[in-house]
Amino acid sequence: MRPVGRHLRLIAAAVAPLLLTACAQQPVTAQGEKIHTLYNIVLGIALVVGVGVVGMILLSAIRYRKRPGDDTLPPQTHGNTTFEIIWTAVPTVIVLALFAMSFVTIRAIDTPKDSYAAVVEVKGYQWSWTFDYGTNKAGTKVLVKTQNNRTPPQLVVPVGETVHIELRSDNVIHSFWVPETLFKRDVVPGKANGFDMTFNAPGIYKGQCAELCGTEHALMTFSVKAVGRTEFDKWFNEFVPPRPECKETGKATSEVTINSVPGASEFVEQCVYVKAGAPAKIEFVNGGGLPHNVAVVKGSDIAGPALARTEIVQDKGSASAQLPAQQPSDDYTFWCQVHPLMQGRLVVQ
Amino acid sequence: MTTVAARPAPASPTPKRKSVVVDYLTTTDHKKIGVMYLYFAFFAFLVGGALALVVRAQLASPAGTIIKDPDTYNQMFTMHATAMLFFFIIPVWAGWGNYIVPLQVGALDMAYPRINALSFWLLPAGFVTVFSGYLTGGGPAQAGWTEYPPLTNARFLDGHGTDLWIVGLILVGVSSTLGAINFMVTIFKMRAPGMTMWRMPVFTWNILVTSILTLLALPVLTSALIMLFIDRNYGGSFFDPAFGGNAIMYQNLFWFYSHPAVYIMILPAFGLISEVIPVFSRKPLFGYKAFVLATAAIGALGFSVWAHHMFATGQVLLPFFALMTSFIAVPTGVKFFNWIATLWQGKITFESPMLFAFGFLTMFLIGGLNGMFSASPPVDYALHDTYWIVAHIHAVLFGGSVFGVYASFYFWYPKVTGRMMDEKLGKVHFWLTFLGFNIAFFPMHHLGLEGMPRRISSYAANPEWATWNKVSTFGAFLIGVSVFPFLYNLWKSRKGPIAGNDPWNGNSLEWWTSSPPPVHNFDSIPPIRSERPVMDARLEREAEAALAKGASA
């Protein structure tokens, strides 16, 4: 049937550009490559079935359209058991084959390994992420987090080696997703989830929360930086905990209060602002649960001499200290001498 | 054999003349209740559609400047889906079921007419309850139509919008449950003499399977909603892990209903299409029994696939749910092949119901095929919660259900009103809808593959997604425009050509009685010897006429 052939060519020409949009992204992990292969197989089957079925529908619409003046009834066929068996059996075989391939792929990407280049605990909260690598050789806790929830945090991983990601949440459900890995997994409160990633090439890849988690869900982004082993080791062992960005002005006073989070080794305030050129009173209020104090040093090296320090407050309570007059600078650190990682930034304006 | 000449519509539906408003407010006539369902459902469709257009307008630019507050945006898509799923698609089929099923089985009304009225009136009550969230301080529900905890626990989302949503949905649930029981009793107990189960029209069969699904699955959703309500308001911790609850349990319960609910939304469309295709191909439905068995198989398998919505949670026995989900393709495939076999060698005409049936066949096929992707857990890892899934649900529920709904309006409007709809406007409506649908939803596959998550109010960090989003928004507005020729056609055709009892040369009993049918539905019923009693009677009449002509000659 010539006209039908022409119709089909037209349809093919219209569909071809659409097909290009049906391709999945080039995967950047070994696990993603397996998923990509499976995707392409399903795409192939779907295309064959889709083109075949649409072709049959269009063909019957064109070929069996009622001709004007033809009022006789067509043959009243009620069914055919052989056909029914064939078109039940053939799809069954296809879906079983697809299932077998899915099964093999699940096993391949979800079987735990014996050892990993790094194990990172990823925590989701409203609305950003922290990446906890544990402690490096220098004894520093390698904990990547965003500053003021503005700049997305970056997960650093070695190329060509398998990294295990542990997913934890103590709030709502999130989903850890790097689109170019063709993989996501939910971060479920109360459930321990995890998966493996093996990046194939160095680069920076975008990531984003995929499960609606409230107001700022759209902004809950992060990135993955895959680097060579040497660079990764250097980054890991020389990790400097990021200092909070303290950019506010006009907040400086001669009396500041610093609170601790109840039951945690963490200050409520990340930044405090002190007036320059005059002594300031530093008031520390312990939220309770753990012993803390506050000491202030110039610069970020807490080993330096303390310019001011309060008494250690064992539980709920407060203590204060006098900070001598200082020159304007944003480079002061306040920290807890019981928990050296518990730090904040002091700005003299 | 008794035959009935085209009879005029009764001058007054009740002996004593009441105002139309009072009449409809107090009626227990399944036809009037059905019509009210249809009005209500279409109203909800327009509300849901308007919300969708705001959502699409927002996404036309990466920074999303139409709605400043992301919470307002979250409310928009939550209420869009709520209106479309719970107040449009499910009720619109309940409406046609109400109107058509008693006619198709030759009954004079539904089994429980008063309960039937209650089922309907619970719906507007549920709608008002859910949408009254807009009057509360925190606005309406905003955690997506799935309302997953812990996000919906009171400590993350306070305000009464979510509570109103829960209560409204429970009202809708009661409505559906009562309706399901009513349909089942009507179908099992009120069939006309000769109407065996294997002679029931396929639309009625699909309403029966849908009702069974509703009856079995809905209590599970209702209990999940009640538990969520207790968590939110009375210090419960069913779903809050911080207090020993299980967040994933809610998802299991929710999808145990809401996956079968997808079939509750699509099976009646399958049934309707299976009525339309034989009529406009002038052939019986190919493989009637296979078709009914496939419907039952989809219904049964539908209870073992819910967790495919949860592959990415990492808390699912993947192989089992992947296997069962893949199996759904088999009975669905059987239906497709039977539809094509029905078309094959037919004498096909392209009136508006048939155009929309072709739209259904080709567009729902997309929804079936892209369902194969997400049925495979590893592939679903890439696609879950992206715009690709948004494309999938719209291919199923718009390409499938909505095309089916439009076909049903064109098909049965002559029966309900006694008038024919305008064919030219019908064609304009079809092509606008068909183009709008493809332009709006096809690009979403690509956006999902490129990494665009669903339910985001802006994508400033990924401006490269803007082009396809603009295309999609254009398509959405085309769909918006397409509604107008349809609405105008509904209005204008109230004075259209007289339809007569059987304008399409139909098969099932609703085409035997007058258009619109009398209060008691039938003055007579033809002998029922197959699933096409009206067709049989017509052939018999023609044979007798030919015989008489031969005898006189």
Image (spheres, rainbow, N blue to C red):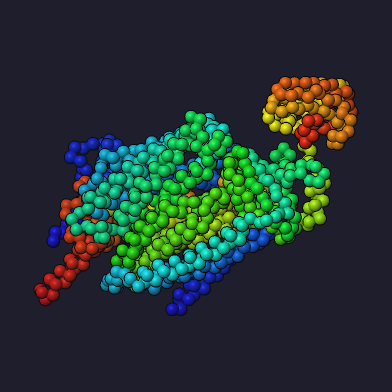
Task: Quadrant for the C terminus of chain B, please.
Answer: bottom left
Q: Relative to A309, does residue A19 appear above or below in the rendering?
A: below
One can see residue B492 in this view: no
Q: Position of residue A160 (x, y in %)?
A: 73, 60
Question: Quadrant where the N terminus of chain B lies?
Answer: bottom left
- Based on the displayed image, in which of its 4 quarters is residue B351 positioned? bottom left
User: How many numbered discs?
Assistant: 0
Residue at 36% from the left image edge and 44% from the top image edge: B176
Which image quadrant is residue B424 in? bottom left
Q: Does B90 appear above or below A62? A: above
Q: Residue furthest front?
A: A114
Q: Position of residue B315 (x, y in %)?
A: 54, 49
Q: Residue furthest bottom?
A: A1
Q: Is residue B507 left or right of residue A322?
A: left
Residue drawn 74% across the image and 24% down it: A314
Q: Position of residue B229 (x, y in %)?
A: 47, 34
Write the residue at 21% across / 67% down: B539
